Image: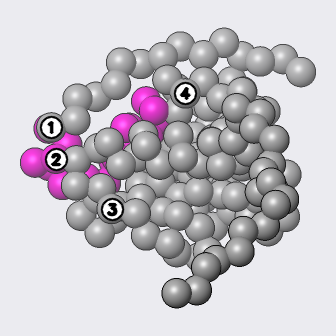
């Protein structure tokens, strides 16, 4: 019977800092918010995770898309919401390429995001595209008042 030789060196371990890389944490948190909604599926499209309900896209990750300087999520918004959010907080919200002209809004999630606001916007986006039977299952989020950021 052969015996295995064990190395006398201790296994190499990376120091545990108790943290996960920030980008990974933000993406996981966004994923958790999206997948908590009824009948949501995740699909990789254009090299990024997207979340859909009934085959319709309601959230797309923007992980430094085309070398942009941000990690964000793109969401369809009700009429006037995109302009309002960008006016009130242009550092956090932006008009994304491709879908911006159709009213979608980009929300940065890499600079200390307000996760309650992100979750409310995701839920609102879900309600924009979900079939009526699912829209009823997800109550409309209470409106949040944003103060205009001056910078």
Camera-side mark, 3 or 1: 3
Q: Which residue is mark 1?
A: 137
Q: Which badge, 4 or 2, is on the more N-terminal residue?
A: 4
Q: Residues within 10 Å of mark 3 (few under 14, many from 20)?
A: some
Q: CA distance from mark 4 to mark 2?
A: 23 Å
Q: Residues within 10 Å of mark 2 (few under 14, many from 20)?
A: some
Q: CA distance from mark 3 to mark 4?
A: 21 Å
Q: Quadrant of residue 47?
A: bottom right
Q: Which residue is mark 2?
A: 134
Q: Which residue is mark 4?
A: 115
Picture layout, residue 26 above or below residue 129: above
Could you say where residue 140 lies in the image, as x and y percent from the top left?
A: 28, 28
Q: Magenta part of the protein: which range?
A: 119-136
Picture layout, residue 16 above or below residue 103: above
Q: Secondary structure at mark 3?
A: strand
Could you say where residue 113 lies in the image, as x and y percent from the top left?
A: 65, 29
- Find out whether residue 129 is within the magenta segment: yes
Is residue 30 among what the camera can see? yes
Please say if the residues under marks 3 and 2 sit with CB atoms less than 8 Å apart.
no
Q: Residue at x 59, y 57 (%)?
A: 61
Outermost residue toward the front in this view: 1
Question: Which disc, if any, is residue 41?
Answer: 3
């Amino acid at each position: 019977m052969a015996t295995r030789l064990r190395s006398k060196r201790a296994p190499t371990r990376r120091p545990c800092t108790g943290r996960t890389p920030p980008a990974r944490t933000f993406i996981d948190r966004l994923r958790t918010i999206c997948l908590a909604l009824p009948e949501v599926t995740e699909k990789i499209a254009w090299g990024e995770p997207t979340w859909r309900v009934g085959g319709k896209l309601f959230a797309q990750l923007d992980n430094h898309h085309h070398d942009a300087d941000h990690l964000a999520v793109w969401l369809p918004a009700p009429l006037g919401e995109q302009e309002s959010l960008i006016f009130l907080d242009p550092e956090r919200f932006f008009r994304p390429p491709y879908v911006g002209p159709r009213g979608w809004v980009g929300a940065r999630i890499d600079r200390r995001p307000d996760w309650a606001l992100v979750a409310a916007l995701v839920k609102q986006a879900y309600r924009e595209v979900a079939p009526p039977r699912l829209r009823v299952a997800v109550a409309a989020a209470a409106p949040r008042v944003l103060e205009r950021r001056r910078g």
